[in-house]
Amino acid sequence: MLITHDTRCALDTVVDLVNTAPEDDATPDALPDLAALEDFVRSHEVSDVGVLSELDLTAVRQVRGLFAAVFAAPDARASAGLINDLIAAAGTTPRLTDHDGYDWHVHYFAPGASIADHLAADCGMALAFFVVAGEQERLRRCEAPDCRRAFVDLSRNRSRRYCDSRTCGNRLHVAAYRARRKEAAG
């Protein structure tokens, strides 16, 4: 599957956005305030964003929840319905642009769109490409028992099981190795 630069940026953004949500009641929200949203927008180089407000923060959190549902969807049909709702609510307006040193690419959000609509349109379209390509199963959650972080499996053979951010795979492999050694010793 060919993934263009702008699609890859949108995928990274949507994964990071979903992963800002608290995993449980004990985990804090990584978008607790407007400053955190501004940092998120800046660190992901989200273009064409004006002055942000508390309303934007609330709307982005709502969009985040819908994106999380896409990663939890049981099949392509369920994902497609959620993505269609996100994109339709954002009022997409596809247009070609070349900015900030990047070659021509498509922005799906309308000029002047809110940050929530911007994310819903661009990130929603990036996820839509995966559903269209029959690759919805690449939108995953970490399989480590104590981690539910989202990620997009871009491995050639679709075999990735753990997120990058917490070295979950290494922790589980080390634990399994120690358990085998303990059993063999005893």
Image (cartoon, grey):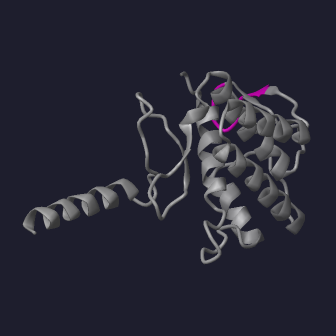
Where's the C terminus, which quadrant?
bottom left
Q: Main secondary structure of the magenta part?
A: loop
Is residue 97 shown in magenta?
yes
Q: Residue furthest front?
A: 186
Q: Residue at the spot x=64%, y=33% of the render? A: 6
Judge from the rendering whether residue 163 lies leftward or rightward of residue 31; answer left or right.
left
Q: Report if residue 52 is visible in the image.
A: no
Vertical relation: 46 (above or below) 177? above
Q: Report if residue 77 is visible in the image.
A: yes
Vertical relation: 136 (above or below) 90? above
Q: Residue at the spot x=55%, y=56% of the render? A: 149
Q: Residue at the spot x=80%, y=33% of the render? A: 108
Is residue 129 shown in magenta?
no
Quarter residue 137 falls in: top right
Q: Nearer the viewer, residue 91 or 111?
A: 91
Start and end of the magenta stretch? Answer: 96-103
Quarter residue 112 falls in: top right
Q: Residue furthest left?
A: 185
Where's the N terminus, which quadrant?
top right
> What x and y, as percent, mark residue 175?
27, 63
Q: How many marks?
A: 0
> What x and y, as percent, mark residue 74?
65, 40
> What x and y, as percent, mark residue 139?
58, 40
Judge from the rendering whether residue 52 lies leftward or rightward of residue 164; answer left or right.
right
> What x and y, as percent, mark residue 167?
38, 58
